[in-house]
Image (spheres, helix red, strand yellow):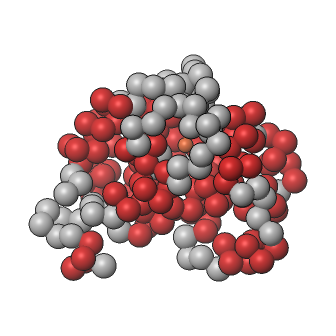
Amino acid sequence: MTNIDEIFQLLQERGHGSYFGEPVSQLEHALQCAHLAEQEGAAPSLVAAALLHDVGHLLHAEHEDVADAGKDMAHEVLGEEWLSARFGPEVTQPIKLHVAAKRYMCATDPAYLGKLSSASVQSLKLQGGPMTPAEVGAFESNKYAKDGVRLRRWDDLAKDPHLKVAELDHYRPVLIAVAWPDGVSSANAS
Ligand code: FE
């Protein structure tokens, strides 16, 4: 079962690869994303989601040129499924939605598309491009849509090679506070 030590081990052992051509590592990206969430006063569950939103990438034994290879790995679904052994929907659903949130914002915020990095524009194509009006309506009806969009905005900003942020251990109490208690699985807690 996923526990917090196992999650931290994954981030520490596999988080040193570059974050898709951006000037930060996967671990730095996760820590910056959580830092931005905390700075904005987000709920602990959303700070946890920010920290863990890309664990799906680390679960794949794939390389950083996945987008170049023309494959969409659906890392947001993999991360959501893996984390659901330990966390409720207020953590896992914004993670699941953070890629759809990008497609949503590209469809609803004309300025947003112009601000995406070139790596992010490239992956957008693989992710299905901007949402159609029907997809926008369905997205907005999701209870976790707003949290998914907030997470996405931090995700897009968490690529600063000079930003100084807290270490991983700073978030241990946050994760403990929002995780299922020991011995409780998603099967009997949800
Ligand atoms: Fe990310």
Q: Quadrant of the N terminus?
A: bottom left
188 relative to 52 in the view: left or right: left
**Residue at left offset 73%, top offset 73%:** 135
Pick the quarter of the image with the C terminus: bottom left
Residue at the outermost top position: 162
Instruction: Kindly tell me whether residue 43 is visible in this rendering.
Output: no
Q: Position of residue 111 (x, y in %)?
A: 85, 48
Above-or-below relation of 63 to 180: above
- Is 15 located above or below residue 171 in the figure? above
The answer to whether residue 168 is left or right of residue 2 is: right
Rendered residue at 75%/72% (across/down): 136
Kindly indicate the quadrant of the structure image that contains residue 167: top left
* Residue 159 x/y as whole percent: 60, 31
Kindly indicate the quadrant of the structure image that contains residue 9: top left
Instruction: Name above or below for residue 107 compared with residue 135.
Output: above
Residue 13: which quarter of the image?
Answer: top left
Query: Percent from the top left, x then y, of residue 45?
Result: 40, 59
Q: Is residue 136 left or right of residue 54?
A: right
